[in-house]
Image (tube, rainbow, N blue to C red):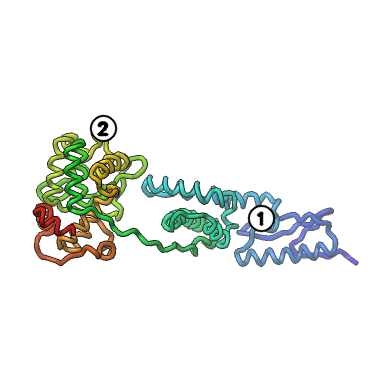
């Protein structure tokens, strides 16, 4: 029987070469098997399968010729998850603190599990098994950790390393936010009075202003004297302090807002002028270092001390913001005004989050309502707190 001749095959003394075109280039890949008639037929069928995968866009050198130099180059181009994750993080233009948080999440959760795997080999089944296998502390922690995981696969898709994104189908778990836990007016007055008597005045001014302005802790740390407009009676909130590194970034909603001053917040700023205004930089500086508050740790320390000395149930300084919002709503301030003061993404957020404190609406000045509330008598205050 004569030798079998097959198109696209090159017969060698001890092997068979398969010829094909892929992405505009010609290739010859060696199959290490004797050129018997049966093996030549098998090689021809192999070539047909390869051509079919090329037509469907499913061909991979690694699947057919794992020892080929082209498979090595293909794997390097595809990259491991760890390599892609590194490239993804380096491509981000987010705030430094956000990027650092993503790095921590990658290092803690995803690199140990997926790092050595080729990203093109990872499937949804593998990812969801990995996600469900981690003993998450809370649903919120899980949801936060999934953000950079999805980001790495979106990056791989955009970089043409994969054709489909298996992470797209991973969904967040719904979780309930804890209800606001504000300080009462009586507690606010006790806390600020104790701070003015027992700590540096700048620390007391900071907390007093926080209670009566509603600014976020990160916004308080980044507030500059140039943001204060005494004539208009507002402060312009246009930046916030990063949690790590001490740099600045845009506010949480990426929207600049003007916060109207009431009598209590204005008086706290007036008292602060003697301490930091001449430096024409941050309004609130750490009296122990003379620098801005890089983190909220020192604030939490003296605030916790005040609560302990006064016998008031502990809550973090961030609850000064909840307190402003609930007092404003209790006094009858317009919900839309309160939402703008707080810098909420929408009025609906304010309605949903603080519905229990919403009072009646009134056409009067919203700040004047807070002024009236802060200046009420002891008997009226006691009645409000009941």
Q: Is residue 81 visible?
A: yes
Q: Residue at x 71, y 51 (%)?
A: 67
Q: Nearer the viewer, residue 300 or 265?
A: 300
Helix, strand or loop for disc 2: loop
Q: Say whether residue 18 is left or right of residue 191.
A: right
Q: Quadrant of residue 24?
A: bottom right
> Viewer-proximal residue, 353 or 103?
353
Q: Which residue is mark 1?
A: 62
Q: Nearer the viewer, mark 2 or mark 1?
A: 2
**Callout 1: helix, strand or loop?**
helix
The image shows residue 203 at horizontal and vertical percentages of 22, 39
Could you tell me which quadrant the C terminus lies in?
bottom left
Looking at the picture, how far across and down is residue 136, in whole percent?
A: 48, 55
Q: Residue at position x 25%, y 65% from top?
A: 355
Is the residue 66 above or below the residue 310 in the image? below
* Residue 354 pos. (x, y %): 25, 62
Residue 53 image point, x, y percent: 65, 65
Q: How many residues crowd around disc 2 within 10 Å: few (fewer than 14), some, or many (20 or more)?
A: few
183, 54: nearer the viewer: 183
Are the residues at dot 2 and dot 1 in contact (C-beta closer than 8 Å)?
Answer: no
Q: Residue at x 35, y 44 (%)?
A: 243
Give the distance between the C-alpha atoms of the residues marked 2 and 1, in whole angstroms: 62 Å
Mark number, residue 332: none
Relative to 108, 219 lies left or right: left
Residue 334's quadrant in the figure? bottom left
Q: Which mark is residue 288?
A: 2
Indicate left or right for 259 with 155 as reference.
left
Q: Which quarter of the figure is the N terminus placed in?
A: bottom right
């Amino acid at each position: 029987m004569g030798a079998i001749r097959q198109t696209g095959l090159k017969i060698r003394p001890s092997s068979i070469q398969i010829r094909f075109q892929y992405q505009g280039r010609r290739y010859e890949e060696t199959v290490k098997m004797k050129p018997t008639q049966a093996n030549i037929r098998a090689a021809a069928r192999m070539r047909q399968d390869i051509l079919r995968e090329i037509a469907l866009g499913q061909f991979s050198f690694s699947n057919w010729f794992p020892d080929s130099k082209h498979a090595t180059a293909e794997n390097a181009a595809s990259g491991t998850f760890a390599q892609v994750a590194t490239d993804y993080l380096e491509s981000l233009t987010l705030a430094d603190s956000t990027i650092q948080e993503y790095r921590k999440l990658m290092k803690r959760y995803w690199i140990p599990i997926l790092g050595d795997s080729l990203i093109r080999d990872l499937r949804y089944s593998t990812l969801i098994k990995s996600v469900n296998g981690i003993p998450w502390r809370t649903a919120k922690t899980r949801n936060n950790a999934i953000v950079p995981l999805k980001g790495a696969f979106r990056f791989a898709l955009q970089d043409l390393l994969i054709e489909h994104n298996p992470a797209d189908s991973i969904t967040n778990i719904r979780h309930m936010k804890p209800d606001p836990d504000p300080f009462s007016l009586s507690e606010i007055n006790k806390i600020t009075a104790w701070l003015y008597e027992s700590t540096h005045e700048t620390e007391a001014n900071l907390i007093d202003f926080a209670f009566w302005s509603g600014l976020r802790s990160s916004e308080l740390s980044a507030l500059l004297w140039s943001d204060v407009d005494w004539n208009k009676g507002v402060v312009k909130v246009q930046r916030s302090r990063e949690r790590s590194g001490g740099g600045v970034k845009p506010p949480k909603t990426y929207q600049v807002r003007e916060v109207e001053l009431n009598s209590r917040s204005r008086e706290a700023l007036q008292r602060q002028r003697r301490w930091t205004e001449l430096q024409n930089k941050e309004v609130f500086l750490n009296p122990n270092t003379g620098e801005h508050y890089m983190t909220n740790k020192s604030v939490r320390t003296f605030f916790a001390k005040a609560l302990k000395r006064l016998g008031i149930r502990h809550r973090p300084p961030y609850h000064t913001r909840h307190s402003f919002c609930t007092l404003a709503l209790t006094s009858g301030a317009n919900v839309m005004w309160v939402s703008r003061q707080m810098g909420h993404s929408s009025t609906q957020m304010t309605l949903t989050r603080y519905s229990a404190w919403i009072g009646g609406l009134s056409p009067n000045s919203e700040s004047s309502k807070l002024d009236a509330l802060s200046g009420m008598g002891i008997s009226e205050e006691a009645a409000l707190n009941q």
